[in-house]
Image (cartoon, rainbow, N blue to C red):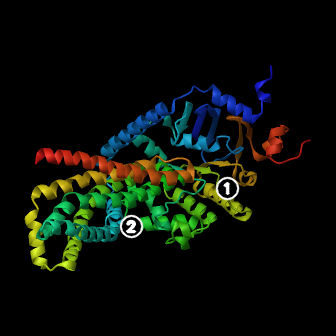
Amino acid sequence: MEPLNNIPLQHKVVIEKLSKPYEIPFTKALKGFFEEVTLLTKFTFRFFKEVVKPRYEFNEFIRQSYLIGYKSFPLVAITGLILGLVLTVQSRPTLAEFGAVSWLPSMVAVSIIRELGPAITSLIFAGKVGSGIGAELASMKVTEQIEAMEVAGNNPFKYLVVTRVLATTLMLPLLVIAGDTVSMYGAYIAVNIKGAISFHLFFLQVFESLDFSDIFPAIIKTFFFGFAIGLIGCYKGYNSNNGTEGVGVAANSAVVYGLLSVFLLDMIAVQITSLLT
Amino acid sequence: METTIAEITHLKKSFGSNRVLNDISFAIEKGENLAVLGKSGSGKSVLIKCLVGLLEPDGGKIILLGQNILGLKEEELNDVRKKVGFLFQSAALYDSMSVRENLEFPLRDLKSKPQKEIDTLVIEALKNVGLEDAIDKMPSELSGGMRKRVGLARTLILKPEIILYDEPTTGLDPITSEEISKLILDVQKKYNTASIIITHDIECARITANRMILIKDGMVLTEGTFKEISESKDEWIRSFFNRPKE
């Protein structure tokens, strides 16, 4: 019999592949999914463990809040303005058919404050901030910067992950409030394109149509959206591998899973809100 | 009397079915420069990553600064790590921080120190590597050699008892490589630190090492001074040192 050492490399590769137990792709995917969920759960528990433990990275938290919150405001503001304008312009003909154009400010306000404002801002935020965090941490991992922090006796999880997750959790609600406000200005401009309504009357109608049960649940759910976006971005970046290819994968999957988590949490939030109100 | 800074006994490490470290044992004394040579992929970097707890070995014992690091809790391990310097192959400077902030970062736990004292420490560390003018530069503005020097300054700032150099001259031109090698020697003389220098650069090992070990197939093939090893009759060692067969 031919000794194994004399077999050409390409044949060895085939033999190795064949000698491995065959795994059905679906089983493999399911196994991968549960492994990922387990790791993400562990990562979340570690976050809660580290967040209460001193030392507190206050300066880094402020810096991240500035980068994540303040630097995202222009994008959120532009999106919000366009959202208010477009929604108003698109809704006008339908309301006009029923002779209900005077309901335009109220309808737009309820739509934006309850759902569209938080959802659109969160999606924009997941795209901009989630991918940024994923790519930044992954490139730090690839260039051994995270290991360098670790061997210097510092806690990179606390410095990099805790500060970013806290910043996304607290900044997203603020951005949603800002985005909603700008959207209402956009709606005011759009109402005045084809009609005429005073600033005072427009906002009087807006606030008359809104209730606390419209505003608070919508804002509270964005804390959870922000937490999920930050946590997933950090998780994907912090645990990336495969060199520079891993940076792209981390950024991409941070956005994909971030968006998915926003939709899932939104669905849960809507169910809870409808049960409570 | 010499003191043992690190002692590694029967260290084993595998990644899946790939056994990288088979049975590694050696010790390093205070003030000694030990070069660890071996082919690329022979597990040299894995070895020093095990030494500082970045990787968990499958078996063996690591005594670092008098403590068995394999049984330590995270906080205890961090206390040991603060006495160990690590110069990464890529220097691993924090991209988002200036040179000054990079050097201040390891001092964060010493915030009780006045800022003036921290500034003095930063400037002193940069002077040691001849880069005090680069204090306000960003890592992206530095050349490969300068990055390595700043990395070394960041390592020196906590005045470690042992420094681990991971391929300190890789990717550098011969002149800069020699400068870095001489700098490693200066650091040894000035601070009396022990150093483990992971390299496959024979010239770097020749300049810096008091003693060398050669790794092959995850085991220590030979140990001795540069002269002893380079004059070995072993064919593999001769080819490693780029010397013709006898």
Whether residue A206 sits left or right of residue A136 in the image: it is: left
Tell me how far mark 1 sits from mark 2, CA to CA: 35 Å
Mark 1 Cα-neighbour bin, 10 Å: few <14, some 14–19, many ≥20: some
Residue in the image at 64% along x and 40% along y: B43
Residue A172 point in image, percent of width and height: 28, 59
Amino acid tagged 2: Gln
Give the side of residue B147 with respect to residue A228, left or right: right
Q: In front: mark 1 or mark 2?
A: 1
The kind of secondary structure element at disc 2 is: helix
- Residue indicated by mark 2: B115
Same subunit: marks 1 and 2: yes
Relative depth, front residue between A219 and A183: A183
Q: Position of residue A3 (x, y in %)?
A: 79, 23
Q: As displayed, is residue A34 above or below residue B142?
A: above
Q: Residue at x 49, y 34 (%)?
A: B70
Residue at 18% x, 45% y: name it.
A272
Question: Is residue A7 something that shows in the picture?
Answer: yes
- Between B88 and A41, the one nearer to me in the picture: A41
Q: At 45% from the left edge and 33% from the top edge, which residue is drawn? A: A31
How far from the left and from the top, in percent, is residue B34? 66, 46
Identified by mark 1, the residue type is Thr
Q: Quadrant of residue A67?
A: bottom left
Pointer 1 indicates a residue of which chain? Answer: B
| Residue extending furthest toward the right | B246
Report whether B236 appears left or right of A242.
Answer: right
The chain letter for the residue carrying disc 2 is B
Disc marking residue B170: 1
Say what secondary structure mark 1 lies in.
loop
Quadrant in which the N terminus of chain A is drawn: top right
**Figure check: A93 above or below A130:** below
Sequence-wise, the earlier of marks 1 and 2 is: 2
The reply to whether residue A53 is in sight is no
